[in-house]
Amino acid sequence: MSFQNSQALTDRLEAASKARSEMLARFRARPTADDPAVMARQSARSALIAARETRAAEREVLRLAEVARAEAAAEAERLAAAERVEAERIASEERAVAKQAELKAQRDARYLARKAKAQRR
């Protein structure tokens, strides 16, 4: 197998050593933790995190308020439905009592009519 890049072993070792030393130089050139620019970035990052947490807390409060509002509306609807059922039950009972009174009045009228017919004879 032929290689297009036929570098000698020493050339490859020198290139790797040079790359390692450049990487180490870039690492050492990084600012330290007490550098003002690093501290400014860190404080900005902390402010962003605090603002994000505040917004998340506000969203949670709004969500909980919406849940409470929905629960209250559901409870009000349940109470209204219960009141409608109770009103219908009462109306039904009143209609039943009125029907019974009407039937009794009809019976009494028939009874009185029979009695009056019997007395006429």
Image (cartoon, grey):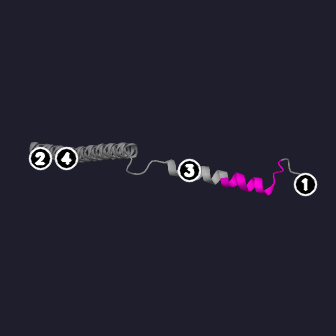
At label 1, the amino acid type is Met
Which residue carries the number 2 mark?
Answer: 115
SS for tag 3? helix
Q: Say whether disc 1 or disc 4 marks the residue closer to the N-terminus.
A: 1
Q: Earlier in the sequence, mark 4 or mark 2?
A: 4
Q: Are marks 1 and 4 in contact (CB under 8 Å)?
A: no
Residue 24 at x, y percent in the picture: 57, 53
Determine whether label 4 and label 2 are within 8 Å by CB.
no
Specify the label residue 25 is tagged with: 3
Q: CA distance from mark 1 to mark 3?
A: 37 Å
Of circles 1 and 4, the one toward us is 1
Q: Bin the neighbour count of mark 1 within 10 Å (Cα to Cα): few under 14, some 14-19, many 20 and up.
A: few
Q: Where does the image place residue 95, in percent across and percent down from the top left?
A: 21, 44
Check disc 1 and report the residue beneath it. 1
- Apparent side of residue 117 relative to residue 5 in the rendered image (left or right): left
As measured in the structure, the alpha-carbon distance from the residue carrying label 1 to the one carrying label 4 is: 101 Å
**Tag 2 and tag 1, C-beta contact below 8 Å:** no
Return the disc, 2 or 1, that comes first in the chain's sequence: 1
Separation of disc 3 and disc 2 at Cα? 127 Å
Mark 3 or 2, nearer chain start = 3
Mark 4 against mark 3, which lies toward the viewer? 3
Circle nearer the N terminus (4, 3): 3
**Circle 2: element type:** helix
Is 9 contained in the magenta span?
Answer: yes
* Discs 1/3, front: 3
Magenta segment boundaries in residue numbering: 5-17
Q: CA distance from mark 4 to mark 2?
A: 37 Å
Give the label, 3 or 2, closer to the camera: 3
Q: Residue 48: horizontal and vertical position, in percent? A: 36, 43
Q: Which residue is mark 4?
A: 90
Q: Regarding mark 1 in the picture, which secondary structure is present there? A: loop
